Image (cartoon, rainbow, N blue to C red):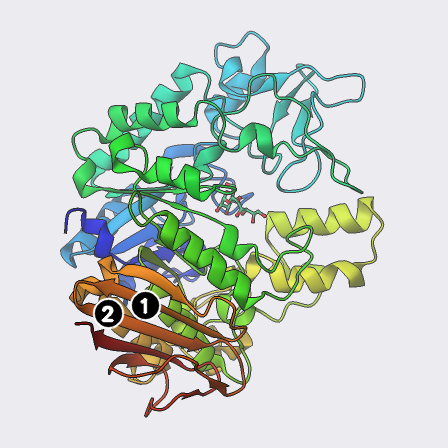
Amino acid sequence: MDLWWKDAVVYQIYPRSFADSNGDGYGDLGGIESKLDYLAELGVDVLWLSPIYRSPQDDNGYDISDYQDIDAMFGTLEDFDRLLAGVHARGMKLIMDLVVNHTSDEHPWFIESRSSRDNPKRDWYWWRDGTADGPPNNWGSIFSGSAWQLDESTGQYYLHLFSRKQPDLNWENSEVRQAVYAMMNWWLDRGVDGFRMDVINLLSKTPGLPDGRIPAGGLFGDGGPYYLNGPRLHEFLQEMDRAVFADREAELLTVGETPGVSVELARVLTDPANRELDMVFQFEHMELDHGTTKWDHQPMDLVDLKANLAKWQNGLSDVGWNSLYWNNHDQPRIVSRYGDDEVHWYESATLLATVLHMHKGTPYIYQGEELGMTNYPFSGIEDYRDVESLNHYYEAVDRQRIPPEKVLPGLRIVSRDNARTPVQWDDSPGAGFSSGAAWLPVNPNHVTINAAAQVADPDSVFHYYRRLIALRHEDPVVCEGEFELLLPTDPVVHAFTRTLGAERLLVVANFSGDVAQCPIELDGEIVIANYREPTGQSLRPWEARVYRQRID
Ligand code: TEU
């Protein structure tokens, strides 16, 4: 194996919802430490921690006020060092979330920057004069409303692509870049094994910050063309590589979160020769059930999903590398979304796992996905905590006068809080997450869907994931085999092969609750399947099978 992460599986932890060791209702580092044996049993290679830095928690830690300390909610730096040692002692690695497109408005850098127009750190953020219409340009924030906030005391506006409490750093300023690199080196020197880089392709903004196009019926301009994949992105990433990763790159993992990335750009970003990133998270397969906006939910068409996944497999087959994911802390639960969380819960959760893990790339598992955790039965707006969800609701209901009953159904399906309910460890009233009142309620289905039951049951979703992870470690064809899509137009059966030398894996999956005839001849040795006695050409509801075939 040339690069170690090519047969690795990454597990994402969202610390506030993972496990609470002190009963305050929030997950913490002690909680993670107590579950390391569970994660080792699952067999994952790398843990990615969502932000644990000091933060006012406006966006659950993606608003950082001190990059070099742990938020008291999660513990201390000593707790962190102990956790890291525990991870390493079990042969796993740990990567941190790097959030450097923006800081918190409570970060000392921003407090200085806003203090006066001639403060030396003024230029560390995007300050601009307003126009006759108000804000400096027409961009909308990704979290609703304008992307600009007026600061009364100095009379200028600052840019925030996310919440008002997340001002964007000005990467044009070299002092900003040097401060970030110094911070990254400090964490690597402490022993962390790399970074997941939050919205890393938003760093470079087009000079002049031109107005965006206002979509029909919209209030704000789309600044995306001027802040996604901007002119200096590659330069910044290569500078970061020289300043931070240079002589220790081989041991580390870097993965960039890159909304709006194309296959062509992903090839450039992940081509090792360019020394930018090991892999990126693309979003296209997660947008197939979006309407005009993410809140306008549409059914996903399997033919589109197959075409999209194949495009990414083929596009990065010779250069670069794919990340593979169905879930993270920003996405609703996949079994509720592209599967069936009622009648065929087990079958659809394991089918989705099979399809993803049989692709070429590095799979990411989001906490609870290995248990088949589902969306939460939200009702009123008071059930939500997520800043994106709340801003969207109040923008729609208070400003645009849309009745709540028209806004809530979309929110229920799409809200990021679906991913953020506590991990279901057991069937006790608090689901084993916390002895106190959890910050977001546990899903009532924890009485049946929980880790204790599944670890004890060899036929559980947990053990199915464990077997998929082991397969990737054992069999080079899973990691390296060439991908080929079969049946591109079949509306319910997904089929593809992975080929390495004389070995071929055939993956077939029935994405429906009905029996489906597989038009491809099914033979070979079964490697893994989610039903007993997987034989014949009929695929049962949500049945998935992987065959090993020899080609002569
Ligand atoms: O997310 C960036 C992003 O583009 C989206 O996925 C976003 O969360 C939203 O759902 C779009 O509708 C990253 C983090 O993963 C997210 O949790 C943060 O809120 C955001 O950046 C700001 O740091």
Q: Amino acid at mark 1?
A: Thr
358, 246: nearer the viewer: 358
- Contact, mark 1 vs mark 2 (Cβ under 8 Å): yes
535, 259: nearer the viewer: 535
Query: Which percent across, then down, holds residue 46?
Result: 26, 54
SS under mark 1: strand
Quarter location, residue 545: bottom left
385, 46: nearer the viewer: 46
N-terminal label among 1 and 2: 1
Residue 75, above or below 495: above
Quarter location, residue 42: bottom left
Residue shown at 58% from the left, 28% from the top = 226
- Ligand 1 has an atom within 8 Å of the beta carbon of the residue at disc 1: no
Please give the residue where the numbered disc 1 appears in the rendered image: 497
Q: How many marks?
A: 2
Quarter location, residue 265: top left
SS under mark 2: strand
Q: Is residue 316 left or right of residue 112?
A: left
Query: Which percent across, then down, holds residue 455?
Result: 30, 79
Residue shown at 57% from the left, 58% from the top = 288
Q: Is any part of residue 482 visible from this angle?
A: yes
Please give the residue where the numbered disc 2 appears in the rendered image: 504
